[in-house]
Image (cartoon, rainbow, N blue to C red):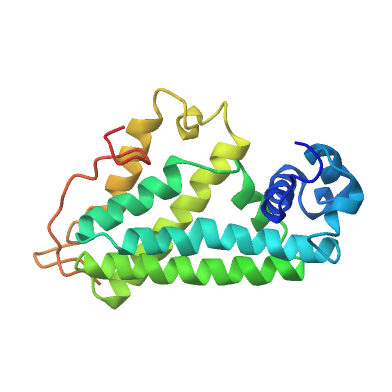
Amino acid sequence: MGKGKVSRDDWTMAALRALARGGVAAVAVDRLARELGVTRGSFYWHFADREALLVAALETWELRATTEVVAAVRALDDAWARARALFAEALGSEEIAGLEPALATQTSHPAIAKVVARVTEARLAFLAEVFTDLGFDPQGARHRALAAYAAYLGWLELRRTAATLAPETQLHDPGCSAALDHLVAMILTPAEPPTLGGPADGQRAPEARSATWTTRSGSPA
């Protein structure tokens, strides 16, 4: 990448890749400048200091991985389509592999803690909204949201740290599509009543449907 052609977004994305690679310590201006093929002086056209870059990178992650995803999914008309699209987007691709699990280990840094908390709150609220639209009462929707988000974070962590032990978590593994299909079906399928008749606690017995996994493009995987 030639000098003078490096944008603010180029710097923020380089910082996010560094965070995924080695945490806050890896966000070093000189190293990023070498990666981008520019001088250190280029950095100061866009940012006052390293902390400003870090904050801008985190806000970019929040926008692309949460705000824009929620807006796109919410625009879909059908509740089941929204649910399937959300999980397909969340688990079917990673713009920067390993970034989210890496951020979870860096919340001792105030800037990261603040944005991760904001993202977590927004995601849990939207997941609860999705499950409410599927027919769950507020408590059931909240419980499903917590379980779904825990499954999401665990899946990404396995993808990052256990590629050989859990190859199905890898996007290009032959077993990935079936494994994701099973996970999403478990999350979206209504629970069986615990004993005699009636819906399970927190559930208004929404109609069960197949959770066919789709790729980011929306076609069957």
Q: Is residue 190 visible?
A: no
Which image quadrant for residue 177? top left
Q: As displayed, is residue 171 above or below residue 96?
A: above
Q: As displayed, is residue 160 above or below residue 104?
A: above
As drawn, the residue found furthest toward the top would be: 174
Quarter of the image where the N terminus is located: top right
Residue 73 appears left or right of 123: left
Question: Residue 83, image x and y in percent?
Answer: 29, 56
Q: Is residue 167 visible?
A: yes
As drawn, the residue found furthest toward the bottom would be: 138
Q: Residue at x 60, y 40 (%)?
A: 97
Question: Residue 219, image x and y in percent?
Answer: 27, 36
Q: Nearer the viewer, residue 123 or 207?
A: 123
Q: How many marks?
A: 0
Q: Nearer the viewer, residue 10 or 193?
A: 10
Q: Residue at x 61, y 59 (%)?
A: 60
